[in-house]
Amino acid sequence: SRQPGRDACGKLARVAEPVEALVKESLFAALDGVDLREYVEQSNGGHEDELVAAIRTDEASLEELSKDFYSAKLITRPEFFAARDTITGRLDGHRRQVAQANGHGLLNSLLGAGQAVREQWGERGLDWQRAVVGALIDYVTIMPAVKGRIAFDPELVSTTPATFRDQMEYVARHFDPITFVDLLAALDDVRPLPPRPLIVTFDDGYRDNYTEAFPILRQIGVPATFFVCTGSIGGDQPFWYDRIAYALFRAQQGELVLPGSGRRFQVGDLSSRRAAAWEMVEVLKSMPDRERLRSLEQLGRRLDLEVRPADRHLGDPMSWAQVGEMSAAGMEIASHTVTHPVLSQLDDSALQYELVESRRQLEAALGSSVPVLSYPFGSPSDYDARVMAATRDAGYRLAASYVAGRNDPRVADRFELRRLHIERYTSMSLFASMLAVPQLFAS
C-alpha cells in the first residue's frame, strides 16, 4: 500500500489513441460514471501542450525509476524515495496548472474516444445499471500540510482537507455515493443501485477522519464507510507501524538491527529513515504474528516506541464517542479487525478472535449489524483463501482488499473487493481520470 502509483498518465495517453484498441465493453460501462459532455466540451486551446509534454516526460521518468528499484534493484531505497519525491512533487505542480487552465488534454482525448465508443457500440444492450458497482475509493488520513518533518510515515497521508473537499464536491456532482449496506441491498434484490454508484472508504480509524473528513462529508452530503480497529479506538497510542516510523525518525544515526530477523537498517538522513521504516514494517509483516509481536517487544527495549503527548495528535485513533457520532450522522462504521495484524500470518484461533471480536465490539457499541470487513494492509499476501473463508464464517458478507481496480457485481468475489487508492500526490485531474476509467488503474 506504500509503493508508488502506476504510470497512469502514460496509460491514458496510450489508450486514448485508437478507439479500436480499447476494450470496448469495459470502457463503455466505466465511462457512464462521469458527465462526458462536461469534459469533452471544455476548451483545450492548446496553451497547456508544454505542460502535458512535461507530465508525460515525468511520468516516464517515474516509471523507469520504479522499474529500476522494484525490478532490477539498481538503486538503494533512500535514493528511490528521494528521487520519487522530486518527480511526484514536480508532477503535482504541472497537473495543478493544467487543471487550473481547464486543459485536461489527456482526459479530453480519452473521454472523446469514449464518446465514440458509445456511439459505435451503443446498441449492444449493456445493462448500464449493473455493469459497474461503482468505484471504491480509499483514504487513510486527512492532514493539513505540515512544513518540515512529519512525525510519522507521510505515505499514510492521503490528502489535505482542502483537496479532500474538492474531491468530495466532485463526487457529489458526478456520482451517487452509497454505502456497503446499499450495495448489499442491491445484491439481495431489495432495491437497485443508483445510476452512478460510488463508495468512499477510510481505513484504520485515525482521529483526523473525525476532525477533518467527517465535517466535510456531512456538509457536502457524501456518506462514507470507516473501517476501524476496535483495539485502538479510544486509546492514546498510534498503530504499531506508526510507532516504528516515529521511533526511527527520532533515533540516533547509525545501524539498527531488527530483533528476530537479523536485518540491518541504516538510519541517517530523512530519506534513509523513511526507507528503513517502510522496509522494517514489511519485514515484520512477513513474520508469523507471534514472532512479530516478540520482535516489536524487543525492539521497544532498544528504541523508544512511546509517542510523546505533543505528537500524538498526528496519529491518534478516534474515540468511541466520535465513532458513535459519525454513525448517528449516517456514516457507515465497519470492521478493520482488533489490532491490525497481517491476517494471513495468524493461527486459526487468533484469526477468529480478530474477525469475531472486532465485529462483536462494533455491533455492541453501535447497536447495528456490521456486515463488512477491510483486510489490514490488504495486499494479496496479507489475506488468502483461509482468511476469506474465516471472514465468511465470522458472519461478514463483504470484504475489501487494498488491491486497486473496479468491481462488477456479477463476477466480483464479494470477499475480495478492489479499491482505488487516493494518495497525497493525486491531483484533481488524475482523481477524475481514476473515477472515469477505474480499470486503467488496476494493480
Image (cartoon, rainbow, N blue to C red):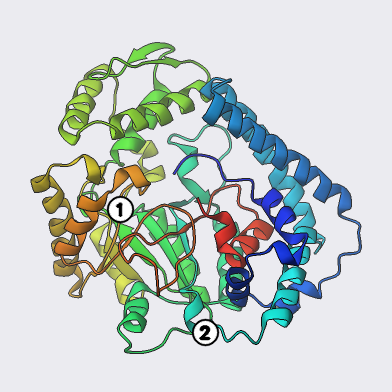
Query: Dot 1: what SS?
Result: loop
Above-or-below relation of 347 to 12: above
Q: Is residue 152 left or right of residue 322?
A: right
Location of residue 181 in the rendering, given as x and y in whole percent from the top left corner:
32, 77
Location of residue 388 in the rendering, given as x and y in whole percent from the top left corner:
24, 56
Circle 1 sits on which residue?
Answer: 375
Q: Image quadrant for the N terminus? A: top left
| Nearer-the-camera pick, 134 or 95 | 134
Location of residue 155 in the rendering, given as x and y in whole percent from the top left corner:
49, 40
Location of residue 215 in the rendering, given as x and y in whole percent from the top left corner:
46, 67
The residue lying at 39 percent from left, 10 percent from top is 255
Q: Give residue 36's quadrant in the image.
A: bottom right
The residue lying at 35 percent from left, 41 percent from top is 312
| Nearer-the-camera pick, 83 or 20 | 20
The residue lying at 86 percent from left, 69 percent from top is 43
Instruction: Using the image, tell me which numbered label, if any, was put on residue 211.
Output: none
Choose mark 1 or mark 2, whichever is in front.
Answer: 2
Q: What's the amino acid at mark 2?
A: Asp
Q: What's the amino acid at mark 1?
A: Tyr
The residue lying at 46 percent from left, 23 percent from top is 273
Above-or-below relation of 35 to 15: below
Instruction: Using the image, tell me which numbered label, if any, was put on residue 127.
Output: 2
Q: Is residue 107 left or right of residue 424?
A: right
Query: Dot 2: what SS?
Result: loop
